[in-house]
């Protein structure tokens, strides 16, 4: 897991400071708690792309709960994951909480 976390940190360091792009990295729900603190290192996040991973509703709910305070967030891309109605509801509620989020 430590190597995977290092890979996430390295990829985040290479992206725009207002974006989190970790698409296609086979991220699982079990890795989400270790990944979330990395979000706070970015200033004024406006885009989170976690598409094409192995995230389920459990992980989507954790992400939605963590992102509630990110008022500059405009886009959260979670397509091509294993998210069911429960996770979709958590993400939808996040959209209701942050004006302009899609």
Image: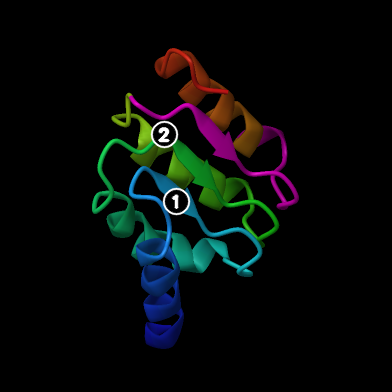
Q: Is residue 83 left or right of residue 18?
A: right
Position of the C terminus, as image quadrant, is top right
Looking at the image, is 22 positioned above or below residue 75? Answer: below
For label 2, the SS is loop
| Residue 95 place in picture, x, y as percent | 51, 21
**x 64%, y 52%: residue:** 56
Q: Distance between the residues labelled 2 and 1?
A: 8 Å
Asked whether 59 falls inside the magenta stretch, the response is: no
Task: Please tell me which residue lies in front, 67 or 12.
Answer: 12
To which residue does mark 2 refer? 46
For label 1, the SS is strand
Q: What stretch is highlighted in magenta?
A: 72-86
Looking at the image, is 102 positioned above or below residue 29? Answer: above
**x 45%, y 45%: residue:** 63
Q: Is residue 64 left or right of residue 82?
A: left
To which residue does mark 1 refer? 20
Task: Please tell me which residue lies in front, 27 or 101.
Answer: 101
**x 40%, y 62%: residue:** 12
Lower position in the chain sequence, tag 2 or tag 1: 1
Q: How many labels does the image show?
A: 2
Few, some or many residues within 10 Å of mark 1 (<14, 14–19, 20+): many
Q: Are marks 2 and 1 in contact (CB under 8 Å)?
A: no
| Main secondary structure of the magenta stretch | loop
The mark found on residue 40 in the picture is none
Q: In this view, does 95 lie to the left or right of 52?
A: left
**x 25%, y 42%: residue:** 43
Asked whether 85 falls inside the magenta stretch, the response is: yes
| Residue 21 place in picture, x, y as percent | 51, 54
């Amino acid at each position: 897991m430590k190597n995977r976390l290092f890979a996430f940190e390295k990829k985040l360091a290479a992206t725009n400071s207002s974006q989190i792009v970790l698409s296609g990295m086979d991220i699982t729900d079990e890795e989400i708690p270790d990944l979330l603190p990395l979000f706070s290192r970015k200033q004024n996040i406006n885009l989170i792309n976690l598409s094409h991973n192995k995230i389920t509703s459990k992980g989507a709910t954790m992400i939605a709960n963590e992102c509630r305070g990110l008022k500059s967030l405009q886009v959260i891309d979670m397509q091509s994951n294993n998210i069911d109605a429960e996770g979709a509801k958590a993400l939808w509620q996040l959209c209701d909480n942050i004006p302009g989020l899609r």
